[in-house]
């Protein structure tokens, strides 16, 4: 009963490097989301995908891109990492807004 | 602007004491309302949710929340706090069920004194 699986759990990048955060859900949900969590700021939506084949910007999309590869997978890409992107990233999925299921998070440090 | 406010950044209560965490939202209509809990290094776990109907909802771990439309509030309560309740608590709303995007408050950190 995996739910939402994120990889990697931890990552350290140098400024300017690129990387992709992977997320997969096995609940057949239509909607998937990427949030970042920073101290004292709750969770802020980066991008979301309401269904396979669609993606939309959230509150803080700058510096990120996403791909909804299929119904299960929703990846987040940092093309040129910056120290301001040091954060904890959470992937989530839901069906019709009933509730969100979260992954365990990816702790990213950009030095 | 639409927003979710958790006025208390940090709350400390003694074990066995009662707890109330506040949440206010500003939206035109009544959104779907949620409380999540996050333990250190973990993802978020749903405590309870309100969609419609009875304004007092029961959740897991002995938590309950009351929706008050007149005050645009959805406060979380527990009659007797346990040490294991120490965590960060987030109030969230969903206003567009098609996309199901959640908007979160900034969180309240709960410390439990022995």
Image (spheres, coloured by chain):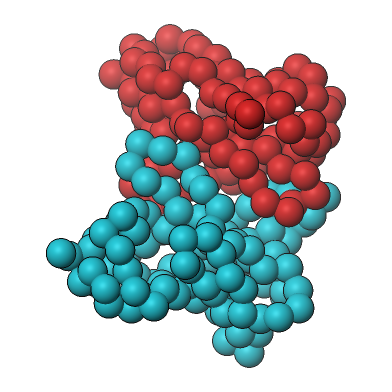
Percent across and percent down for residue A87 are: 39, 33
- Farthest-out residue, bottom: B70
**In the rendered image, the vertical position of residue A20 relative to residue B75, given as above or below:** above
- Farthest-out residue, left: B114
Percent across and percent down for residue B35 are: 53, 61
Question: What shade has chain A been given?
Answer: red
**Residue A72 sits in which quadrant?**
top right
Q: Is residue A34 visible?
A: no
Q: Is residue A18 visible?
A: yes
User: Which quadrant would the C terminus of chain B be assigned to in this image?
Assistant: bottom left
Q: Indicate left or right for B73 with B111 as reference.
A: right
Chain whose colour in the figure is cyan: B
Percent across and percent down for residue B76 are: 48, 72
**Residue B6 sits in which quadrant?**
bottom left
Q: Indicate left or right for A70 with A21 as reference.
A: right
**In the rendered image, the vertical position of residue B58 relative to residue B105, given as above or below:** below
Q: Residue at x 65, y 23 (%)?
A: A24
How many tags in the picture? 0
**In the rendered image, the vertical position of residue B61 relative to residue B80, given as above or below:** above
Q: Indicate left or right for B36 with A101 as reference.
A: left
Q: Residue at x 41, y 33 (%)?
A: A88
Percent across and percent down for residue B108 are: 37, 62
User: Which quadrant would the N terminus of chain B be assigned to in this image?
Assistant: bottom right
Q: Indicate left or right for B102 with A86 as reference.
A: right
Q: Residue at x 63, y 29 (%)?
A: A1
Foreground of the two, B37 or A88: B37
Q: Residue at x 55, y 15 (%)?
A: A20
């Amino acid at each position: 009963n995996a739910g939402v699986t994120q990889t990697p759990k931890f990552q350290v990048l140098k400024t300017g490097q690129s990387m992709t955060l992977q997320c997969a859900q096995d609940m057949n949900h239509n909607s998937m989301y990427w949030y970042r969590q920073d101290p004292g700021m709750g969770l802020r939506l980066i991008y979301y995908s309401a269904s396979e084949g669609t993606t939309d910007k959230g509150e803080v999309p700058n510096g990120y891109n996403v791909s909804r590869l299929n119904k299960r997978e929703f990846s987040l890409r940092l093309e040129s990492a910056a120290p301001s992107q040091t954060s904890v990233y959470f992937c989530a999925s839901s069906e019709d807004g009933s509730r969100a299921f979260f992954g365990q998070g990816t702790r990213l440090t950009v030095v | 602007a639409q927003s979710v406010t958790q006025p208390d950044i940090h709350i400390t209560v003694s074990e066995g004491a009662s707890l109330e965490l506040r949440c206010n939202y500003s939206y035109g209509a009544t959104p779907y309302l949620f409380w999540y809990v996050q333990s250190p290094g973990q993802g978020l776990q749903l405590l309870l949710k309100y969609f419609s109907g009875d304004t007092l909802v029961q959740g897991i771990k002995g938590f309950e929340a009351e929706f008050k439309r007149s005050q645009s509030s959805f406060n979380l309560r527990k009659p007797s706090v346990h040490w294991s309740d120490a965590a960060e608590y987030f109030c969230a709303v969903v206003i567009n069920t098609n996309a199901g995007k959640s908007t979160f408050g900034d969180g309240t950190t709960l410390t439990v004194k022995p």
